[in-house]
Amino acid sequence: MVTMADVARLAGVSVTTVSHVINGTRPASERTTRAVRAAIERTGYSQNVLARALARQRTQSLGLAISGLSNPYFSDVIAAVEATATNAGDTLLLAETRDDPEQELKAVRALVERRVDGLLLAPSPGAAELALPYLRTQEIPVVLLDRFADDALDQVGSENERPTQELVAHLVSCGHTRIGMVVGIAGLSTTVERVRGYRAGLRAAGLPDDGELIADGGSHADRAREAVDALLDLPDPPTALVSGNNHMTIGVLRALKARGLKVPGDIALVAFDDFEWADLFSPRLTVIAQPTAQLGERAVELLLSRLVDPSLPPRTERLQARFVHRDSCGCPASAVVLP
Amino acid sequence: MVTMADVARLAGVSVTTVSHVINGTRPASERTTRAVRAAIERTGYSQNVLARALARQRTQSLGLAISGLSNPYFSDVIAAVEATATNAGDTLLLAETRDDPEQELKAVRALVERRVDGLLLAPSPGAAELALPYLRTQEIPVVLLDRFADDALDQVGSENERPTQELVAHLVSCGHTRIGMVVGIAGLSTTVERVRGYRAGLRAAGLPDDGELIADGGSHADRAREAVDALLDLPDPPTALVSGNNHMTIGVLRALKARGLKVPGDIALVAFDDFEWADLFSPRLTVIAQPTAQLGERAVELLLSRLVDPSLPPRTERLQARFVHRDSCGCPASAVVLP
DNA sequence: CTGTTAGCGCTTTCAG
DNA sequence: CTGAAAGCGCTAACAG
């Protein structure tokens, strides 16, 4: 590998000068500048950002610890985070948490060890036990993403309770009284809030809210499938289902398909999370669409602002989710489209 | 930030010893080991891998430059790459190319500057002009992924020509004689090979192979949509369509929907790339499914083996793709399922 | 406008 | 079984 010293030698200047012309940190004569650039060109010199970071005490990089390279919802968030970070001149380092506390700790640790200037984290259910305590021992700016887990930190997520309640209200307005819900990983704030919205929806409609029709889908397609099976095996099964997120929606559909149940003909379905292609295939899903891009963007903004001023008070932000009315709820075509 | 020196002081040993017990690079007495561990615990010490990498001349990290945090096909590949790398004790650094030569150069450069030990690249159409020449000036092991672009490098991708021909043959066997194709980014090896397969399919069926029914979808949903519009506006439009990849399939469907055309009733459709949910919604797409996980895994394996032995001759590997027969081709239920 | 020099935090001979 | 010391490649006073 060619180093700055090589370039300096070839350009007939000091490494200091080379460093300064590369970084534009101090004026240099036209002549030297040209000589340095030429030397860089000729040698194919490529700056070692590790050495640079070591000397500078900052890496110009941000870390994102999240579950779900496989989750289209998070893919959108990640893309937005990446774009916003790049735009601010920072590199994004990605680490997979698999929504598992141990793995999450590893991911977060890897990022800290790489000395990212700041960290974005979509906390797993067990974050309060491992990752978060660890982060408290490291003086590094952190913002929580998607899920809320610590009021002492900056957090961004979308509205969960009200939209879920809206979903239920919609099913009720279509005449349903037995409404089941497949819920995500226990302990996640998103799960908790969506369940709360579901129950509020039932109560608002004067329906029993005894949790009988709640099944744990663990935020996972396969588990959601089993959850639906359990629900449908009930003596008095639900006639409508609310799916807690996109992964589980797939599982729910698999379960229904296996039983030969048509949506919405035999059973109604509404879900949290939209799909890019939701309009194109049938059943066309009625969903709550989260502001994914906005979420990623906002999270980075919060982080960057804290990097500038670490003394800022912790901020918690909620972003609006959107009700998208399609066919899977089984409403007559003329059904109300909620705001 | 607490450093090794802090830990050493607190443990009453030298930094050398601390380094060795952390890395297990040389035996230490039970007593010292314990003291060091305790000191680490108490200080919340977190190793600075940048400094470590600088001293060691290797980062224990692999870089992946690819387009498409938004592409589910690549998401799978990325997940597999990540898993395989992690498994081998390496961290994965991700960079987005957007399939744009300039951006790709930046991505690759960023990775090299971070001194990744090896690099995986899904080359953009213009890679031969920018990224690849740049990489040749840097002595770093590279393996190409998904697309082929340089025989002098290791490359892994899936079979494209034969499967596409198979897709066409299938449509022919369903009785179609006007078969159009929406093709991906010009210049990509995958595009070239799939077009070749399409043409071979036509010729094998004794159909005209004048390229009249080929439309450029640029590997992008919106452009694919326009491409389909152009095709359908032809005096003698196709009765069946082949979509060159998953993004474009979405665009194709949008175009058909806008015209009120049903698949497969009004027009048949087959595509390259499977979708996780393809079985659950209608139309159920007949597709070629690529071995995504295998592809990512194999690419990392090639890279790791080259890291161990840089003198290995360049290898090019093709992975088998799978024909998945569903409904969108419009065959009678009893249709042949190709092997 | 440019160069000397002392680190940044870690690894690794070499010596004990 | 342990430590001193010389770098790894870069930045940033400080001095000129």
Image (cartoon, coloured by chain):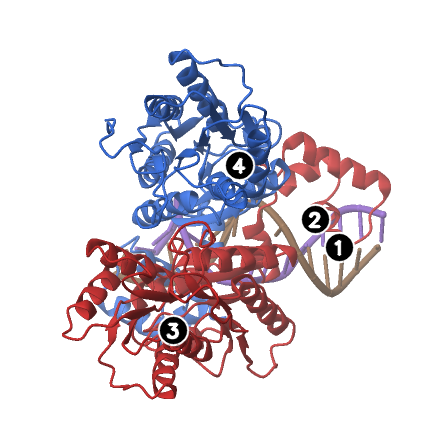
Chain colours: A red, B blue, C purple, D brown
Please say if the residues under marks 2 and 1 sit with CB atoms less than 8 Å apart.
Answer: yes
Q: Mark 4 to mark 2: distance in Å?
A: 41 Å
Asked if residue A104 shows in the view, the reply is yes
Asked if residue A183 shows in the view, the reply is no
Q: Is residue A242 left or right of residue B128?
A: left
In the drawing, what numbered circle is on residue B219? Answer: 4
Q: Mark 3 to mark 4: distance in Å?
A: 41 Å
Q: Chain of mark 1?
A: A
| Circles 2 and 1 on the same subunit | yes
The residue to which callout 2 is attached is A19
Number of numbered callouts drawn: 4
Q: Is residue B109 left or right of residue A233?
A: right
Query: Residue A132, position in %: x, y?
Result: 40, 75
In the drawing, what numbered circle is on residue A25? Answer: 1
Residue B217 vertical placement versus C15 (above, below): above
Q: Chain of mark 4?
A: B
Please say if the residues under marks 4 and 2 sit with CB atoms less than 8 Å apart.
Answer: no
Front in this rendered view, residue B77 or B128? B77
Residue visible at 34% across and 65% down?
A269
Under mark 1, the amino acid is Thr
Q: Secondary structure at mark 4?
A: loop
Residue visible at 26% across and 55% down?
A254
